[in-house]
Image (tube, grey):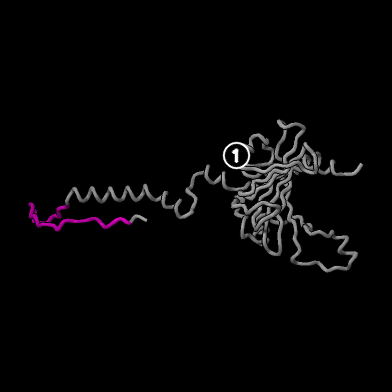
Amino acid sequence: MLLVSEPMIVPRRTVMPEGGRAAACYNPCLMRTFFLSCAIALLAWPVQARQDGTPAGTAGDADRDTIEMHVGIPGLVYVGQSLAELKTRFSEIESSNFAGDEKVRIVRIVDRGVSCFVAGDSEEAMQVISVGFNFEGTYEGVGESGYRTIEGIGKGSTVNDLLGIYGRAEITSAGQKSFMQRRKANARPDPNEPKKYLFASDDGRVKTYFQSEGAQVVRMVINHLALIDQYILKRQTPR
């Protein structure tokens, strides 16, 4: 951090002008040096903030690094984004057909902790219908994501943090056994069982859930419900 020294004042010499009051004499060159140091310090302050890891304060930087609820990261990876655009945003992605269906693909950006479902009736029409961000550990081959929501939910966040920010949620089990299976087995609820905390968009078209393990929030998934139903759920239903 730049430190600005105190202004240097030349020892004053006593001048006795008319009226008998003494006046201090300042060296103009040293005063110019002082003001120049102040200007340099002010210019260097935002750079120092970036080196410390604090956001520089520009809207563009913040927008690229934060997840918007029910959307994703606008301009980077988001629901409704075309597959063609997604490919231009990341240098390395992994892509494979989902359940052998050429109209649905799973796309993973492993080093960014992001995974997506993309779907469409043709290559050109394919778009993101679901996007997930993994906050903790490795999940289905995807590493940890450094992204956080605009409100701050991400790695290290707890369920209490989540509910304190977004309010009441619809809660479902993310475990292998359904509620009815546990009921038939007379099993008591496990407080550490993985759960999903679901929040719907105002228009009901998109639903976002956060998955927990114990008290920790471990991942976030944003789903476009109609497109998930069209391309994944209906195709998986036996006829």
> Residue 48 at what x, y percent from top left?
41, 52
The magenta segment is 3-26
Mark 1 neighbour class, 10 Å CA radius: few under 14, some 14 to 19, many 20 or more: few
Q: Relative to 64, is 166 on the left or the right?
A: right
Q: 218 or 3: nearer the eye?
A: 218
Q: Which residue lies under the disc numbered 1?
A: 89
Image quadrant containing the C terminus: top right
> Residue 46 at what x, y percent from top left?
42, 49
> Residue 157 at what x, y percent from top left?
63, 59
Question: Where is 185 relative to 30, above or below?
Answer: below
> Which residue is located at x 59 percent, y 52 percent?
146
34 part of magenta stretch: no
Image quadrant containing the N terminus: bottom left
> SS of the residue at dot 1?
helix
Q: 137 or 132: nearer the eye?
A: 137
For badge 1, the amino acid type reads Arg
Q: Relative to 15, is 174 on the left or the right?
A: right
> Which residue is located at x 71 percent, y 59 percent?
212
11 part of magenta stretch: yes
Q: Main secondary structure of the magenta part?
A: loop
Instruction: Report the number of numbered marks.
Output: 1
> Residue 99 at what x, y percent from top left?
80, 44
> Which residue is located at x 60 percent, y 54 percent?
152
